[in-house]
Amino acid sequence: MNCSLDWLSDPEVFEVNRLPAHSDHIVYSNIDELKIGKSSLYQSLNGMWKFSYAVNPDKRKSNFYADSFDTDSFDEITVPGHIELQGFGKPHYVNTMYPLEGKEHLRPPFVSKKDNPVGSYVKYFDLDDGLKGKRVHITFQQC
């Protein structure tokens, strides 16, 4: 496996696998929406999501994203939120040793195959009427 990161030192590379820079402000379709602060062009997915925690990638639920996958065995988690503060995994603090220190000798870009937590999220929702038939982007950020 070639894990070359040579492109990082290329002064001509400014972006890889991302959309061009753009405004992330909420937009409104008319002045009335602006006045009440509710846009028909924005839909929040914050709230309860289906969630499966695994201690490493080999233990994760595979194909959980398939339409036919049954998520009944998944837990629920509040999004946005920290998985460690909702009972999954262990919080990490900067004034203590990281959990991998002293356990495995790892150097970037290699990661642990034993202790590398994975969270798998599923959210079922209906697209708001104001977004139907339009180009839709999903962004993962905490507002």
Image (cartoon, grey):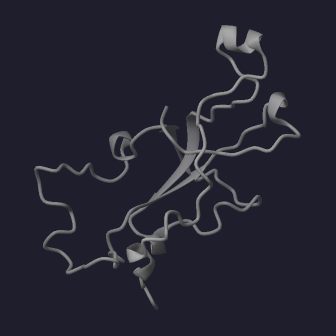
Residue 30 locus on image (x, y percent): 78, 17
Give the total of numbered labels. 0
Q: Quadrant location of residue 140?
A: top right
- As drawn, the residue found furthest toward the right would be 133
As displayed, is residue 36 above or below residue 19?
above
94 left or right of 9 in image:
left
Q: Which residue lies at the image location 40% right of the left edge and 73% below the top edge?
A: 8
Residue 72 locus on image (x, y percent): 63, 50
Residue sitting nearer the eye, 62 or 18: 18
Residue 136 locus on image (x, y percent): 75, 44
Residue sitting nearer the eye, 98 or 115: 98
86 left or right of 76 in image:
left
Q: Which residue lies at the image location 54% right of the left edge and 66% below the top edge?
A: 16
Residue 93 locus on image (x, y percent): 19, 49
Residue sitting nearer the eye, 93 or 28: 28
Q: Which residue lies at the image location 37% right of the left edge and 50% below the top edge?
A: 88
Q: Quadrant location of residue 63?
A: bottom right
Q: Which residue lies at the image location 78% right of the left edge and 22% below the top edge?
A: 29
As displayed, is residue 113 above or below residue 56?
below
- As drawn, the residue found furthest toward the bottom would be 1
